[in-house]
Image (cartoon, grey):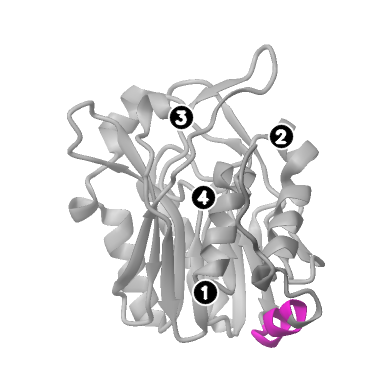
Amino acid sequence: MKTALLQITSSDDPGENLGRVRAMMAETAAQGARFILTPEVTNCVSTSTTRQREVLQHEEDDQSLASLRDKAAALGVWLLIGSLAIKTHDSDGRFANRSFMIDPQGQIVARYDKIHMFDVQVTETETFSESKNYRPGDKAVIADTDFGKLGMTVCYDVRFPALYAALAQAGARILTVPAAFSPVTGAAHWESLLRARAIETGCWVLAPAQTGEHPKTRGKTRYTYGHSMVVAPWGEVVIDAGTDPGIHIFDMHDSSVSEARRRVPSLTHVRRFDGP
């Protein structure tokens, strides 16, 4: 399966971001990719709640989702929309950070709401409180595709290996980790975490990422780490995209999953235990 990661620098203008992603999808499909992945919050990167309330939409009304579904159908490709920031009908007004798997007919075959919220103090001056504006999901999700079962996760989820073990034990052979990673934590942990998730599960790990300084209308400037990454089931880094926006294409072979799991069949060695 010829597969492509899109590394982008989303602004807080969903329409602008949509045009860029659709153009990249067309270019990618022209190069033969049949599965395309975009990063976390493809539609809007913003630190301003006011701006988000102005431009975000509910899933049923979201123009980015509708247009990307149409584009996937027109190109005849599978598309992982890494995530969209989506309004919900929750009484507290929080958004959802929702990943979508789209088939070549433009249908949504799976949706996943990010479970783990990025509530951290990275440095003395850099603090994130994702749960203030986003409500966490509570369900692990596997998408069935014609190239294998795919476990859907988002960004900060990568620090919680039990989620990935559960996905792999439920049949996932591919794990997706779309992200908008902090430059500080990215430099320290991004590659190590992705390689660990691949090695532990014997899965392909596909991690399209936001990168660089994000244009804004209001709020603080947001920076992301980039380095979209593909890790093979044995733990080799197949792609490290660096920090420039762009398209990164590779061939994904299901046989690599079978071979890694044959050599170290750790998923079959899981034992229950008591304590501590």
Q: Badge 1: few (under 14), some or many (20 or more) residues near its Cα, within 10 Å? A: some
The first of marks 4 and 2 along the sequence is 4
Name the spot of residue 240 as percent of width and height, x first.
Answer: 77, 59
Residue bounds of the magenta highlight: 253-261
Q: Are marks 4 and 2 in contact (CB under 8 Å)?
A: no
In the rendered structure, which amino acid carries the disc numbered 4?
Val
Residue 84 visible in rendering: yes
Q: Which residue is mark 1?
A: 171
State the mark number for residue 130: 3
Report the quarter where the N terminus lies: bottom right
Q: Badge 4: few (under 14), some or many (20 or more) residues near its Cα, within 10 Å? A: many
User: Looking at the picture, does residue 199 appear above or below residue 4?
Assistant: above
Separation of residues labelled 3 and 4 (CA atoms) = 13 Å
Separation of residues labelled 4 and 2 (CA atoms) = 15 Å
In the rendered structure, which amino acid carries the disc numbered 3?
Glu
User: Looking at the picture, does residue 270 appear above or below residue 115?
Assistant: below
The first of marks 3 and 2 along the sequence is 3
Name the residue at 79% across, 65% down: 235
The first of marks 1 and 4 along the sequence is 4
User: Looking at the picture, does residue 226 appear above or below residue 198?
Assistant: above
Q: Badge 2: few (under 14), some or many (20 or more) residues near its Cα, within 10 Å? A: few
Tell me the quarter of the picture where residue 174 sits: bottom right
In the rendered structure, which amino acid carries the disc numbered 1?
Gly
